[in-house]
Image (cartoon, grey):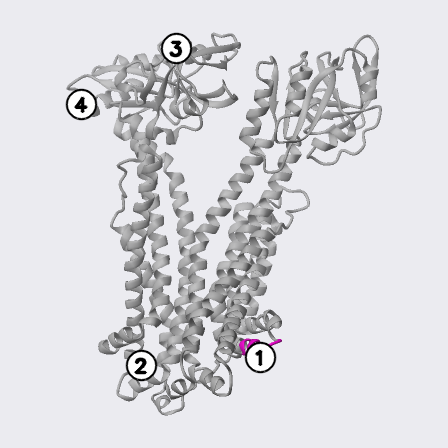
Amino acid sequence: MRTVVRQELRHGVRRVVAPSLAIMISVAFVTLSFGATAVLKGFVSRAVAVKATRSDLVVTPGEGSAGGLTAATGRTVAAVPGVAHAETDFTRYQSVTWADGEDLSEVASVPADPRLRWTALREGRYPTAPDEAAVDGQTARVLGLHPGARVDLPGSPGGGSGGRQRALTVVGVADLGAAALVVDGRALLMTAAGITGLDREATPDEIDVLIAPGADPVTVRDAVARALGGSAVVRTGQEQADWAAAQLTRHVDVLGGVVLGFAAIALVVATLVISNTFSAIHAQRVRALALLRCVGATRRQVFRSVLAEAAAVGAGGSVLGVAAGVALTAAGVAVLAAFVPAAEGLGLGLAWWMLAVPFGLGVLVALVAAVAPARRATRVAPLAALRPHDAAATRRTSRLRLAAGTIAVGSGTAVLVYSATAHQHLSGLLVGIGGGILTLVGVLGLGPVVVPVAARVVGLPFRGRAAGRIAVGNAVRNPARAAATSVALLVGVSLVTTVSVGAASTTAVAEAEIERHDPVDLVVSASEGHALPAAVAAAVAATPGTRAAATLLGTTVSAPDGHPLGVVSAPDAAFASVWRGADVGPRRSGTALVPGDVAGRLDLRAGATLTLRTGAAGVPLQVRIVPHLPAVVLTGGDLARLGGETTVRQVWLRAVRDVDVPRYRTDVRAAVRGTAGVHVEGSIAERAELTNAVQIMLEVVIGLLAAALVIAVVGIANTLTLSVLERSRELAVQRALGMTRGQLCSSLLVEALVLAGVGTLLGVLLGIGYGWAGAGTLLGGIVPGGVPLVVPWGTVGLTVALAAVTGALAGVLPARRVARRSPTAALAAD
């Protein structure tokens, strides 16, 4: 039987190309996911080690300790025998006024001992006084900062600056190197005294220790731990680096798990493709297998021979896949090193099991996919070799399969509806995934019934010509073959549609929530008691990228609690042009739109009366609460009734669609730069970050699913090629009866289009349901009225178009092959 297996593999190379390619893509995907995870872990570990390994010992707060570390802790550590130097290390996040406006930045202390400094000085020097600072190289490059520049930051009310704005002189530019990976955003380096001057209650994040020459680090570590009495954790520098890397790389593990999940999807699709391929090969080899039985081969030998072929195909594809995965990982490292200098010299970090596991999975997938065809091969009777061979004969779908498929579809749909309406969030999502898998299994089980019906619908536009009628007839005549051809593409398209619909529906909900909480893109407002100069307000309204602007006049009045309260007014048309929230309707004289926080402070309810005063006389107004209003808004007539001086207090902005948000915010800040007491806030950045995050996630996920789609296309091409070989005599008869080569090619292309269209149509319908159910499960309990169904028709349309193109391409090769054969040669073939 070994000779038989070798001969089959040698003479049937074309038949095993497609399953080998499917396995290669899947195994390469798994290998790449392992490699990418290992490389990212190595990069993160290197970034953390840059700082931690500068110290001999690192003292950090204990998990159960109260109050954390203090200056006294540092003195205690410094007094331990064997400790040469102990230095407190501070890190905090606070708002810093840079050249382009305020931004939340990391403020870290620079070690006084040069041996502990983990940054590389690029320009100038390190700060030595409390009013000096160094900036990170990336920020300096973006903002054009050099020694001598100035940045401002507010002092804490409890700090030495008394809460006033504090000016810092930039004295140096420091390169963070690989450690930039663990620094979020912009970084400012100061002395420890400078940070404690900002906030006297600031506590150290860690204490970095250098031990005396000749001292044993472990012995000193234990002595420091005893001196602190368990109130802190003491680690060596390397132990601290390993611990910090483990904390940070948990996210990498999650990312690796997600990528492996998509690799598993690719393996499932590959299993379907390989199973369909071996089933088609088995259908062609019925007489050959029967002849083997006639010459004495047992059922067990036939079963083993089919599995041996599958194992050989799996091993070959797996070797190629592992090699491709390693090559892609190496290419990724090279690209990373080219764009991130800190990654230079980074190795692949691939362990032996990261190569063995993908190889084993590839072989296992091939064997699992071949089990069913191998079992069918054992049921071939020896007398089948003496009968006329009808390879195109159809297999009837059993009633048990139909009943099981119907029950699975019904049960899975019920579970999906329950998960989408029960609002169990993450636990409900797991239930919904189970329901989706059950539904998909049911659809696959009903494929021989559903696919022919769908093929007749999809094939309606082609029935006007003889080639089209023949193609549709061929597509539905063998339901099992048609279902097997369409199923792989069905799975791939349904996954892409699921992700697209889920992302679009989730984004719509998130944007609605953002608009409800922050209904104005940007609000430029003067602080209480100040006004916006008319020229500044005009410059803000004229900022490039502005779709609409509302300039609000206002004044300061006395609220019922005696505190000053700013009120503004804008015409209805201007108000509506910038307002993104729920429609507030026409405003009436005598009514005040009151923000929710002001209503809570004054203990107001909707419909209550609010009396505002600018002098002795008060103006009573009926309260209408608008939760997230930027200010108390009156009509122009009511503002005039209050009297007093009115000035420009706020400018509300609505940006054009697809505006460059960072640039737009920078331009607005530039328009108010130099004007005291002006604040710029709003939801545009949050909305843009959400949209960008969802778009990036969508692109990444669809990119990961592309592997499954490629495998599905390979499956369609392979199944069509094998079905053409299987029907060579039938097609020769059609040629002998007068069908031209062009008509034959057209019929095969239409058949490929119809089968691809069926898989796409069913995949889109399933994906829309899955995507909506997933979004409803996660967000249904948060959103009043449930999650809307949002279908991104652009993405769905592109998927359908790509499926049509790939379907046509899948039919080109078999069509050309059969067209080149003469009718007499095909009729003579057996």
What is the spatial separation of the Cα atoms under label 2 and label 1, in whole angstroms? 44 Å
Specify start and end residues of the magenta stretch as a single range.
464-473
Indicate the amino acid at tag 4: Asp
Q: Who comes first in sequence, dot 3 or dot 4?
A: 3
What kind of element bears circle 3? Answer: helix
Q: Position of residue 257 (x, y in %)?
A: 40, 47
What is the spatial separation of the Cα atoms under label 3 and label 4, in whole angstroms? 31 Å
Which residue is labeled 2 in the image? 299
Which residue is labeled 4 in the image? 216
What is the spatial separation of the Cα atoms under label 2 and label 3, in whole angstroms? 84 Å
Q: Position of residue 417 (x, y in %)?
A: 61, 56
What is the spatial separation of the Cα atoms under label 4 and label 2, in whole angstroms? 71 Å
What kind of element bears circle 2? Answer: helix
Q: Please give the label number shown on residue 466.
A: 1
Which residue is more in the foreground, 730 or 454? 730
Quarter of the image for residue 118 reads top left
Which residue is labeled 3 in the image? 193
